[in-house]
């Protein structure tokens, strides 16, 4: 009989080692949480075609702003993910206001921060044709050098020497040396921690400050880089900047 | 005791497999009513890459892909199907054109390669910019100088065709047409294009014997060319700089555009030489009209620059007789079964 006990232990160990690897569990009851993004420039809600000034003193206007986010998570103490939805991606698109309202189901543990990822995991960049929000028809895919465009900003600036003073930023890159995926963790206003439950709806309002696209971690002058459409070192600097566009304004419980 | 052990082993075995099974997310609901097609690996070929578990090949998917490949509606003006640049009688290269004609009287910027044995390719295009066969068609469809279309417009056109709706439904179980299904169908068609029945293959299988010139040519090839043009694919799938001058109109620096690494400047994919005799012109920009010109390049044309591959830097000594023999050998790589295979020809209706 001893041998059976040994066998049992072995089996248990083997099972533990090879069972599906889950980074953060999102099991148990799921509660809806809504993120409501508001894109702004110069402190006002973004309007296409309107003249703005970036923090480096350069004028610009915007005709397109799109960004992939995903891996929405609840975070405790700013570092510990307590629940995460790794399945769903969303395409924020300034041409479609409804796209700025994002809902996901998450396990209702205690949290103090909200987290998400900008960009699409490398696996979806290397596994062939995808559908839904990842459909290349959404115009966020490089066809001649496979990979998703994680974020797009297009418009005009008198500081651009491109045709028609265009500014064109297509930022992406999923290989480790060109990584443009960035993690965002935002503290929620107030000191207390929150939990999701059935009785209250939770909505988090997040401001996107497009000014910081040009100047936050790096100072990226339009005059120096009016257009970038490939992964690489420059793309990665814009990625550092786009990770800092976000600010939580409020958490609303209904 | 011994029986106990066997029993334990079996238990472990079963447990392990049940867990592996449960972790496998790729469960493909039997899209009922489809007939699967078995992909056969030719003798002497290694196993292909796994493009199949995510996109099992079926008769219905393959036929849909075939129809799409020959359909001009994938291009903006209706005149440029994939098959306009990839012609079966030229092993799916563009016959007799250094660069191919695209929409609005434009030309491609590279020579269209033959299409075959794609299931063994991890990367596609002369610069390796495409990392999966399913996403390759997006490049020609959207390129302004090739098919000049948008993905949405193609999907709309397909959606308006009752026959396509039926074919998509048969192949993938739902009538909804989206880019993913279109791309998977095209991939099924192209993955099945296997070329492994040339005179060379028959010689390898002991079914024919080479002439003396062919045999000599094969030996020269093995000595001087096969490191890069490695059997059985006649490419080692690497990117190399063979000391060609830069075309001042195209300014194509090859692999560097993809890796942004200066060391990859002027490196291009080592092309397969299967069917090479019928895929002329040659080189990434089609600058050589005949095999003789390519061989002359290796004999006397190679530019010795810092990036030139050490294997060709000092040029490859080849006598006129050897050049003749090499060409005789290269002709044995033509697969006339493949270029006449009606599975890949234009569908009738």
Image (cartoon, grey):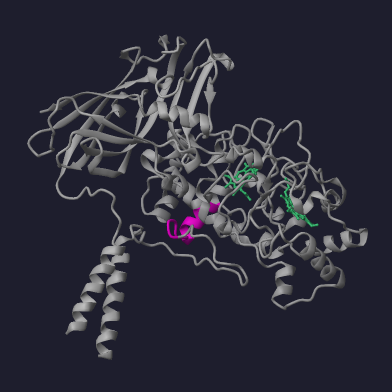
Position of residue B328 measured from the top left corner of the image (x, y, whole percent)? 84, 63
Query: Foreground: A182 or A126?
Result: A182
Locate residue A75 relative to residue A246 in the image: left or right. Answer: left
Name the foreground residue: A235 vs B101.
A235
Write the residue at 69% across / 76% down: B205
Task: State whether residue B73 appears in this view.
Answer: no
Give the quadrant of the N terminus of chain B. Answer: bottom left
Residue reaching furthest left? A199
Residue A192 lies in quadrant = top left
Q: Position of residue B8 (x, y in %)?
A: 26, 81
Above or below: residue A204 compared with residue B171: above
Residue B212 picture quarter:
bottom right
- Left or right: residue B22 versus residue A144 is left
Q: Is residue A173 visible?
A: yes
Q: Position of residue A200 (x, y in %)?
A: 9, 33
Q: Nearer the viewer, residue A43 or B178?
A: A43
Seen at 42% across and 40% down, the residue is A135
Residue in the picture at 27% in, 72% down: B15
Q: Is residue A251 above or below residue B13?
A: above
Q: Which residues are magenta?
A: B53-66
Find residue B91 and report its horizontal and vertical position in percent.
69, 55
Asked if residue B56 lies in the magenta stretch, the reply is yes
């Amino acid at each position: 009989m001893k041998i059976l006990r040994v066998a049992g232990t072995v089996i248990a160990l083997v099972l533990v080692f090879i069972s599906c690897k889950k980074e953060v569990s999102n099991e148990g009851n799921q509660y809806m949480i809504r993120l409501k993004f508001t894109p702004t420039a110069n402190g006002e809600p973004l309007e296409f075609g309107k003249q703005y000034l970036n923090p480096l003193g350069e004028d610009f206007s915007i005709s397109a702003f799109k960004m992939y986010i995903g891996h929405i998570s609840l975070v405790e103490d700013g570092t510990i993910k307590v629940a995460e939805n790794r399945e769903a991606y969303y395409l924020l698109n300034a041409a479609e206001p409804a796209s700025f309202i994002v809902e996901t189901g998450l396990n209702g543990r205690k949290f103090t921060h909200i987290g998400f990822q900008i960009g699409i995991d490398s696996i979806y960049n290397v596994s062939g044709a995808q559908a839904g929000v990842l459909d290349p028809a959404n115009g966020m895919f490089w066809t001649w050098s496979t990979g998703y465009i994680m974020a797009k900003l297009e418009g005009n600036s008198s500081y651009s020497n491109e045709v028609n003073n265009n500014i064109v930023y297509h930022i992406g890159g999923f290989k480790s040396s060109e990584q443009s995926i960035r993690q965002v963790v935002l503290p929620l206003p107030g000191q207390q921690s929150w939990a999701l439950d059935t009785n209250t709806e939770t909505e988090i309002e997040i401001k996107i400050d497009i000014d910081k696209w040009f100047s936050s971690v790096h100072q990226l002058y339009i005059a120096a880089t009016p257009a970038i459409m490939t992964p690489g070192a420059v793309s990665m600097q814009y990625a550092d900047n786009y990770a800092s566009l976000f600010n939580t304004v409020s958490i609303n419980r209904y | 005791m011994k029986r106990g052990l066997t029993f334990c082993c079996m238990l472990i075995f079963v447990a392990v497999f049940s867990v592996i099974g449960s972790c496998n997310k790729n469960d493909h609901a039997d899209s009922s009513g489809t007939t699967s097609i078995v992909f056969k690996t030719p003798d002497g070929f290694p196993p292909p890459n796994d493009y199949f578990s995510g996109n099992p090949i079926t008769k219905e998917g393959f036929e849909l892909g075939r129809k799409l490949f020959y359909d001009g509606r994938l291009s903006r003006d209706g005149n440029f199907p994939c098959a306009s640049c990839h012609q079966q009688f030229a092993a799916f290269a563009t016959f007799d054109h250094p660069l191919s004609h695209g929409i609005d009287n434009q030309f491609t910027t590279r020579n269209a390669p033959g299409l075959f044995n794609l299931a063994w390719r991890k990367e596609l295009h002369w610069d390796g910019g495409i990392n999966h066969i399913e996403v390759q068609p997006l490049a020609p469809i959207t390129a302004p100088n090739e098919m000049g279309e948008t993905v949405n417009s193609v999907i709309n056109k397909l959606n308006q065709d009752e026959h396509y709706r039926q074919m998509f439904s048969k192949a993938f179980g739902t009538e909804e047409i989206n880019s993913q299904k279109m791309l998977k169908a095209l991939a099924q068609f192209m993955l099945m294009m296997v070329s492994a029945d040339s005179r060379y293959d028959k010689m390898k299988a002991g079914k024919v014997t080479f002439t003396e010139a062919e045999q000599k040519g094969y030996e020269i090839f093995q000595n001087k060319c096969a490191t890069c043009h490695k059997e059985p694919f006649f490419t080692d799938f690497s990117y190399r700089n063979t000391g060609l001058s830069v075309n001042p109109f195209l300014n194509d620096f090859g692999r560097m555009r993809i890796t942004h690494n200066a060391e990859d400047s002027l490196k291009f994919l080592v092309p397969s030489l299967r069917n090479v005799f019928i895929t002329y012109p040659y080189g990434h920009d089609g600058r050589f009209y005949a095999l003789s010109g390519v061989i002359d390049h290796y004999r006397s044309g190679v530019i010795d620059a810092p990036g030139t591959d050490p294997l060709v830097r000092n040029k490859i000594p080849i006598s006129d007789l050897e050049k003749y023999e090499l060409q005789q050998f290269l002709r044995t790589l033509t697969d006339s079964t493949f270029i006449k295979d009606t599975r890949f020809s234009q569908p009738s209706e």
